[in-house]
Image (cartoon, rainbow, N blue to C red):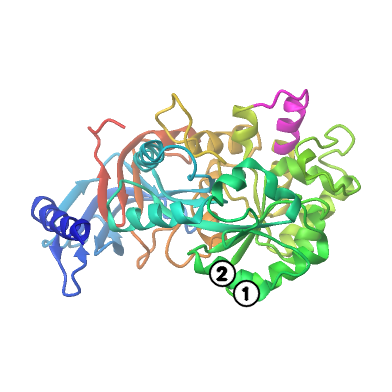
Amino acid sequence: MSRMTSRFHCVLAAATVAGLFVGVAGQAVRPSLLVRDVTLIDGTGTPPRSGVSVLVRDGRIVSVAPAGATQPTDVARVIDGRGLVAIPGLIDAHVHLSGGPREEQIASLRAALRGGVTAVWDLAGDARTLGELSREALVGDIESPAIFYVALMSGPAFFTDPRVVEASAGYRSGDAPWARAVTPGLDLVQAVAEARGTGANALKLYAALDGPTVRRVTAEAHRQRLRVVAHGTVFPAKPGELVDAGVDMLAHAAYLVWEGRPPSPEFQKRAQGDFDGVAPDSPVIDRLLRAMRDRHVALNPTLWVFAGHPAADGLADRRIRWGAEVTRRAYEAGVTIVAGTDGMTTRGDPLPALHRELELLVTSAGLPPAAALSAATRNAAEVMGLGAERGALPPGRVADIVLLAANPADDIRNTRAIRYVIKGGAVVREPDQAR
Ligand SMILES: [Zn+2]
């Protein structure tokens, strides 16, 4: 109770300082904001528009109008957008937040937010921690991107992995509602309902599942309005069986190599594919990519995690090249590319890793800069089931906006030239603020 009271007082104090006021339902209402005379890349696919003003009220975009038009006079704050480029807040659709000391989690989230990342998708962890971080991010107790997360399902063989044992602490490994072993006797309807009850918006299918099981789990998850993410291969189910089952996204481009080799029950070998024997341009991979396009299965390549942390197994260079080449071919085939880092931040780099992933999508996988930007904004929001709320900046959307000093459509590295970060209509980073 005392904690609640002190939080209540914090809101009132913040209201005085930041000019917020408390609405009828007791909820803080964000001050209005006008970004005047900016170049806007709104993420809907329309070309950049220069000389526009973006009006934000109560956390959402209200209007986008020519800068010369009559401007409202009652806004709490005006940002001079001349010389700046506005893009939608970046979304890292593959992070892992739980585990490790809480102070590190908090520092990492703060760095991500100040580095332009306004939403993240945690693809497996301890849902108790994730739910609490998500709540704290939502009410403003911590400086953080908005946090969305999944519940994991996997074959029983995976549940000796120390990471999942840790994420299930207090439960027998395999029995936690957010980290569930799919056994023959499992009541799948109940298990999916419990996964959903953790606050997760998707299931992650990790390993040790066969094709028919993936199909049953995916159908039940979709019936209960959860999205489904899978590793590029989950052994013994091959990539093509995951696509046939209708999962929404495959993670790790390099794992798609297993489409060209017989399935193995040894999911631990997932990164040790036959990168020499199965060419990225082989017919079997082409067929897979066309099926992904036709079934609307997105690809989450995670190029940076392989390139930035190369494994010492003698395959690192080939794995990196293969993943990048398949990402290029997937993009050219019309597969939706969704950016994610599998890491969010790295020690020693003040900027979140998503900027590196974006650079690799352009320099290694050959995406045009605008397409890489879509991978970290609109495409990410859509695969997360948040397409009506986030990922683009037409009127009505959540006002997650990053103001850059240079145009990322000219050079993707310009996503690092951050001047302001606006999250839900609130300015959370100013130009003179250290990261
Ligand atoms: Zn991951």
Label 2 beta carbon less than 8 Å to ligand 1: no
* Relative side of 42 to 95, left or right: left
Q: Which residues are magenta?
A: 310-323
Occupied quadrant, residue 249? bottom right
Q: CA distance from mark 2 to mark 1?
A: 6 Å
If the image is split into quadrants, where does the C terminus sit?
A: top left
* Relative side of 170 to 239, left or right: left
**Residue 9: % across, % down:** 13, 57
Occupied quadrant, residue 297? bottom right
* Relative side of 109 to 189, left or right: left
Residue type highlighted by circle 1: Gln
Identify the disc placed on residue 20.
Answer: none
Query: Mark 1 packing: few (<14 Cα in 10 Å), some, or many (20+)?
Result: few
Identify the disc placed on residue 190.
Answer: 1
| Residue at the image point whose x is 48% and y is 41% from the top | 409
If the image is split into quadrants, where does the N terminus sit?
A: bottom left
- The reply to whether dot 2 and dot 1 touch (C-beta < 8 Å) is yes
Question: Is residue 45 visible to us here?
Answer: no
| Residue at the image point whose x is 37% and y is 64% from the top | 397
Q: Circle 2 is placed at which residue position?
A: 194
